[in-house]
Image (cartoon, rainbow, N blue to C red):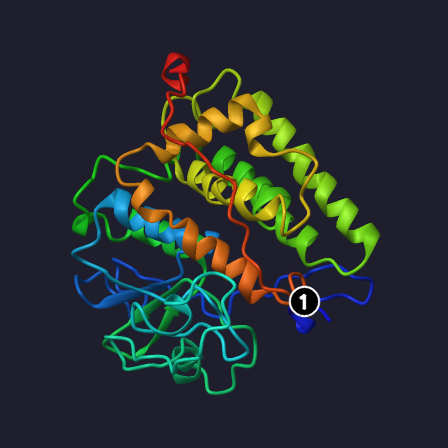
Amino acid sequence: MAQFPKEQSASGEFERQEDAFREWISTDHSTPYPPVSNRYHLYVSLACPWASRTLIARKLLGLEAAIGMTVVDPIRDERGWAFRNPGSGSSAGSAGDDTEVVPPSTDPVNGFHFLSEAYQATNPNFDGRVTVPVLWDKETKRIVNNCEGDICLMFNNFFRALTQHREVDLFPKDIENEQTKLSNYIYDKINNGVYKAGFATRQRPYEVAARQVFDALDHLEQRLAKNRYLFGGRIVETDWRLFCTLIRFDVVYYIHFKCSLRRILDYPNLQGYLADLYQHDGIADTVNFDHIKRHYYITHEEINPTRLVPIGPQLDLMQPHGREKLT
């Protein structure tokens, strides 16, 4: 049985649903959502690469004081993303244990038990898959946006007056077109590519998707041979969208999604680039391998019916990477 039946084609391809909520924060009063401190709240999962990108943007820009954040439980069941007290339920059990199911706790903003309640509060007729991240408006009590690309862009552009690190620019105007083109390529071939391989239900769609992943990784390996980052010596949002897949690759996608042609560890430039970004101030704090592994291996029972979580691999991302020589 497919993981997400509504997102599965008859020929076995995974076809990701469109984001349901795409309203915008504005500084010119063109929307009902001004960039006001302490008005918006971010719901994320530390396991999800999409959500992790918004978490990284929030941290790099220094928006922690202006935008609150809640982390959902890593294990998602048929009821969707849940809010659980630390140390209870699935968060308490060791990976693979048959732990007793503990009722989810409420979230601190709305008293929700499940993130699906935020979706229903915004659109009672919503019947799609509930996803993270979610940017919630505490004043109107509705979701503003659940698209990670939009949220990162809004954080960077429209919340700039509230940022603590205004020197950070994740979307520089001088490379706007080139950055958009590369970001779209990375999304299609790598970010979503591993999912198209992992959730394929027939051999040919799996092989097509998996080979596209490695063709793209080969291309970026060459690009990073002469550039420290994707656009030379500065880090932009495109780097972080690639990072969020690379950091999960050897731990999850290589095994669980059968993207097993090569590891990131087998790519000298990509591995060094990954370590370089991981060692950037504050980034290691956004990576939780326990959440990542337990979410994928326990949640996707049709891929991993035993729900056993691998004990490895051991990754040392704090080793010297030498990438500073390319700046």
Residue 87, position as x, y percentages in the image: 31, 68
The residue labelled by disc 1 is 302
User: How many marks overall?
Assistant: 1
Q: Is residue 222 above or below residue 33?
A: above
Residue 13, by quadrant, is: bottom right
Residue 313, position as x, y percentages in the image: 52, 40
202 or 180, nearer to the observer: 202
**Quick one: SS at disc 1?**
loop
Name the amino acid, label 1: Glu
Q: Residue at x 30, y 80 (%)?
A: 106
Residue 141, position as x, y percentages in the image: 29, 79
44 or 82, nearer to the observer: 82
Q: Residue at x 71, y 68 (%)?
A: 2
Q: Residue at x 69, y 51 (%)?
A: 197
Q: Is residue 319 above or below residue 26?
A: above
Q: Is residue 142 above or below residue 289?
A: below
Residue 78, by quadrant, is: bottom right
